[in-house]
Amino acid sequence: MLKFFTRPQPAPASPTAPVELHPVQLRPAETDATFEIGRRMTATGEYRDRYDYDRYQILLNCIHAWRVNPLARRCVELTTQFILGAGITVDAGPNQAFIDQWRDHPVNQIAEQLPEWADEMWRSGNLFLVGAVDDAGMTYWRPLPAEIIGELETYANDPYRLKRVKLTDMQAQQFFGYKRGVKRKTFVLHFPINRPAGADWGESDLAPILRYLSLYTDWLIDRAALNKYMKPSYIVQRPFNSQPEKDAFSKEVRPPVPGSTTVADPNEIWGTLNVALGSFDASLDGSAIKKMIAAGMGFPLHYLAEPESSTRTTAEAAGTPTYRRLLQRQTWFVTMYQRVIQTTLEVRALWAGDVNPNALLKITPPDISERDNAQMALGANRVSSALLPYWDAIGGQEVVNMIYRFAGEKDIPTVKAGAQPLGTQAGSAEEEPHERDPEAQEVSA
């Protein structure tokens, strides 16, 4: 935690004089009882979190909208599909064999659970993962629906550390939060998103657009109902000698079928009555509501089956803020996944001791957009062509740094002293042959 040191002694007047060393006095390590940085945040938590009944109702509305509303489900699916893509790769170094066994265990099947975890995150704003440990130290994970969490208890001086959760079931079951170095058969991890500072609970991505999803559904149903009654009504005018003759004609007359030919008496006048409901003017209202939904989710309209009048250039420009939002979501998801794996390794090391929880752990997510790869490849090709002739002038390491930067790579290799780019070494097979003199060819012939 925070370490406070004594005031440093002034430097000696002469550089050759011996330096007198003073012992550095450190305060005791921070504990749960002395960690005060979050106490002020905890005091404001009751104003930042929703009331229990309000949060519970919003969670029910979100899961209901996801079940019955195609737009709500598509918004959640789009985020998950971009985040997970073709899959997330894990490099656990010396612990790779154990991680593969844990991930592919028949009880875990992490690859199948990841989409469920992601959907639950965006849908409820809170992901509760319960870990169950067997006697061998293998951890099995299951998500808890946020609606069944009755009470979420955090530490008194830090609302960001989970202490315990209580369920709303008949047994009032509870799970303690994970604590490193403590042996527990079951524990829980909490991953919130869209959480206000100082609050305990996260917020659903669907919460701001629930009202507009409902308005759009009502508008669509009303529009379909109005269009149903816009079928033409026919009116026939002709002279009748008596009321019984008129009644008999009204019983025998049949409205013409669309596309058919109607043969009328010279004394008959056929006409139509169209209901002037003006439902076609409501398309602007529907578009405005759908724009609110798209803005609330951070997606352009053409992601939600609304091409509008956008050109390809406009659509590509609209994708930049969307990719930024999705990249933040992916970074958050990768951090969550890394914490789950790290917790699994720590539990295994505590129970069995055959893994190293401090070893290298690298998680590589898929690319958000394939178009970015093409642009970075083009940029790296152009900058390498421009900088390679100046390899010796500006330094090989700086050239490699700039090429990797344009390629979007963060792991930049170190260039060895005296190294030259491929194709410039003397006698290299990549060196292009010089043009030969025609006269020399004739002499040799």
Image (cartoon, helix red, strand yellow):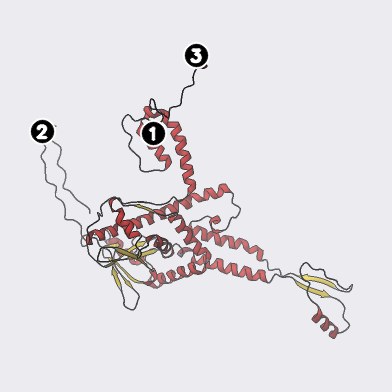
Residue 316, given in percent of the width and then of the height, sits at 53, 48
User: Sequence-wise, which precedes: disc 2 or disc 3?
Assistant: 2
State the residue in front, 154 or 90.
Answer: 90
In the image, 427: left or right of 131?
Answer: right
- Mark 3 lies on residue: 443
State the residue in front, 231 or 276.
Answer: 231
Q: Which mark is residue 399?
A: 1
The three-letter code of the residue at mark 3 reads Val
The three-letter code of the residue at mark 1 reads Val
Residue 100, given in percent of the width and then of the height, sits at 33, 56
In the image, 144: left or right of 1?
Answer: right
**Which image quadrant is residue 122 in?**
bottom left
Packing grade of label 1 (10 A; few <14, some 14-19, many >=20) is: many
At x 76% / y 68%, what residue is drawn? 258
- Mark 2 lies on residue: 17
Helix, strand or loop at mark 2:
loop
Residue 85, given in percent of the width and then of the height, sits at 45, 54
Task: Please tell me whether residue 125 is drawn above or below residue 441 in the rendered image.
Answer: below
Packing grade of label 3 (10 A; few <14, some 14-19, many >=20) is: few
